[in-house]
Image (cartoon, rainbow, N blue to C red):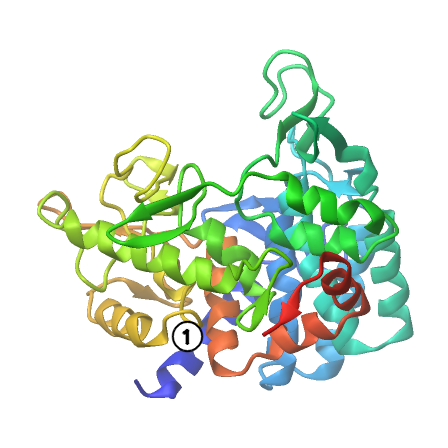
Amino acid sequence: MDTNILENLQQKAFQFFMDYTNLNEDSKGYGLTVDHSERKDLASIASTGFFLSSIVIGVKHNYISYEKGRHIVNRTLDTLLHVDHHEGFFAHFIDLNSGKRHQKSEFSTIDTALCLCGVIVVDQFFKEQDIHHKAKNILERVNWSFLFHKKDEKDMLYMAYNPDKGGDYVEGKPGFIHHWDMFAEQLMMYVMIAGSPYHEHALSLYEGFERKIGTYEGITYIYSPGNALFVYQFPLAWLNLKDYIDHQGTSWFDNAKKATLAHQKTCINHMEMYRTFKPYIFGCSASHTPKGYRVYGALPNMMGKIDTDGTIAPFSMIGSLPLLPDVILKSINEMLNIKGLEGPYGFYDAFNFEEDIPWISSRYYAINKGLELLMLNAYLHQDIYQLFHQHPIIQKGFEVLKWKKV
């Protein structure tokens, strides 16, 4: 495939973040990015992590000037210092204009971590004292120990905290919500903890979640209970783990590669049931669907059957571009030939051809577009990979977790 096509997709994804982020100089929500393009008043804090990373890509590839990028990052970090948080953990959803927590949104570990990935990237790239000072305050403010607890005699992290009765994800009594007791998209959190003042607990926390092993069509890997494809991809948007194994011999890069192949085989084996599926059009993930936002999963999973309505999200495939380029380049080529799938910011969020009238989403979800952007960059240039790995927090994190190059 002509790399100019991929470069064009990268630039379009960058432009999405410029057009759907609050860049109003007079706003208290400066630098906050929408959750999705059809709701312009609601920001997802995770989206801002992708936005900050996009600014670096923009500067590196001359989409914007260094000075403009520096200004945007400075102002965005000002916002992150003052938006609602609890023990340094951001609310999942925030009012785009006021910077206030949206209704009774939970204070989320994973959404905070995705935001912090962007903070780490801009801190490493700009090397400016004011940016470094603000980034340091944001990163050091996070009290990871607030979430530490024991579950089944293992060290564990809570997923979220919500103090409000009837708040998001609250079941009964308000407070701590669920546990990271399984493998999912949380890998980068252990690296951050390992690089923080709470590093003494990082390895036991990392060892505390269950590694459930399953096999599909001869592909054996550590799988997430629901087996949505995004859980394998999101940590690898910043962490280049291609040549790394942990102290137990696990390669999370190879694991994500196997998960992608298992998703592809799952979809191939269900092509008679779902006509949207094709050999290179595959992946069960989290996206917009004809019935709203849904999270789907391939085999193996805890239900023992494929969980999908046939919807396919382009980011499901592009999110594995650095893992399986020969496969995914064919996927991209096929998607380019689907009429109406590409819009002003690249591919729309999802498509479903199960009914006689084809359905293509009119939305762009920021975190999905962000994953596309970073994985395109990882394949083309590795700008974000290199910067993230150079940061002292990440370098210390690798050392504490005993992740080694092979």
Residue at the (37%, 71%) spot, across then down: 324
Residue at the (35%, 62%) spot, across then down: 317
- Residue 270, x across and y down, in percent: 15, 47
- Residue 206, x across and y down, in percent: 67, 46
Looking at the picture, tell me which residue is in the foreground, 378 or 366: 378
* Quadrant in the picture for the C terminus: bottom right
Residue at the (63%, 21%) spot, across then down: 167
Q: How many neighbours does mark 1 have within 10 angstroms: few (below 14), some (14-19), or many (20 or more)?
A: many
Q: Is residue 74 above or below residue 383?
A: above
Please identify the residue farthest to the top as the structure is shown: 172
Q: State whether residue 72 appears in this view.
A: no
- Residue 325, x across and y down, in percent: 36, 75
- Quarter location, residue 135: bottom right
Residue type at the position of mark 1: Leu
- Please tell me whether mark 1 sits on a helix, a strand or a loop: helix
Residue at the (72%, 57%) spot, across then down: 401
Q: Is residue 228 above or below residue 51?
A: above
Looking at the picture, tell me which residue is in the foreground, 375 or 187: 187
